[in-house]
Image (cartoon, rainbow, N blue to C red):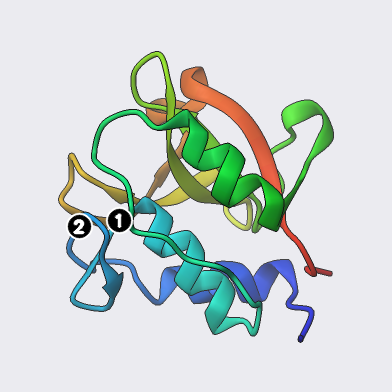
Amino acid sequence: MTKPSRDEIVAAAREYLGVPFKKAGRDKFGLDCVGLIILAGRNCGLEIYDTTKYTMGPHPELLHEFLYPQTERLPGNRLVHGSIAILRDSIFPMHTGIITTDGSEPMIINASAKARRVVEEPYKIHWAANLVGMRDYKGMI
C-alpha cells in the first residue's frame, strides 16, 4: 500500500469538483460525501473498504462501523490539510469532507446535497459550527 501525502489527498479530492451529487454514488457521474472520501483515498493507493448500505438519514453507527476503523483521530479537532472532517447536518454526525488549507482560509471539499455537486467552500462559513471530529486516512504521510 502506498503512503500518500496530504497534498495528494487534496489533489485527488479536487478531481471530483463539479461532479453531481448522487446518494451512494461512486464515480465521476455522481458522488455522495462518503463516496468522495473513498475515491480520494483509493485514487491515492489506499485500500479502503466501501459500503452503500445507508440512507440519507442520520446513521452515526456508520461512522463507528465503517469510517473510524479506516481512519485515525486527530487530537484537538485541528483543521489539517488533507484530513477528513466529520460533521453534523442535524443533531447527528452524518456528513464528511476533506479540509484544504493551502489558500488564504480553510476550505472543505464535500459532496453537497444542497449545491447538488462536489464543491470546495469556505469551512468557517458553512461548517465550523457543525464539526464533530477530525480524522486522517490510515497510511497517510
Vertical order, 32 against 6 (above or below) = above
Q: Is residue 104 visible?
A: no
State the quadrant of the N terminus. bottom right
Image location of residue 133, percent across then percent down: 64, 31
State the quadrant of the C terminus. bottom right
Q: Specify the amino acid type for callout 1.
A: Asp
Q: Secondary structure at mark 1?
A: loop
Q: Is residue 78 left or right of residue 53?
A: right
Image location of residue 67, percent across then percent down: 58, 49
Q: Specify the amino acid type for callout 2.
A: Phe
Please state which of residues 131 and 55 is positioned toward the viewer in this rendering: 55
Residue sitting at x 26%, y 31%? 57
Image location of residue 103, percent across then percent down: 57, 54
Residue sitting at x 63%, y 51%? 101
Query: On residue 32, which mark appears?
Result: 1
Answer few, some or many: residues within 10 Å of disc 2's Cα (few below 14, many 20 plus, some between 14 and 19).
many
Q: Earlier in the sequence, mark 1 or mark 2?
A: 2
Residue located beneath label 2 in the image: 21
Please state which of residues 11 and 112 is positioned toward the viewer in this rendering: 112
Image location of residue 17, percent across then percent down: 32, 67
**Which image quarter: residue 127?**
top left
Answer few, some or many: residues within 10 Å of disc 1's Cα (few below 14, many 20 plus, some between 14 and 19).
many
Query: On residue 80, which mark appears?
Result: none
Q: Secondary structure at mark 2?
A: loop
**Which image quarter: residue 121?**
top left
Q: Is residue 58 visible?
A: yes
Vertical order, 71 against 95 (above or below) = below
Vertical order, 107 against 141 (above or below) = above
Residue sitting at x 41%, y 55%? 34
Q: Across the whole image, how many numbered discs are drawn on residues?
A: 2
Q: Are marks 1 and 2 in contact (CB under 8 Å)?
A: yes
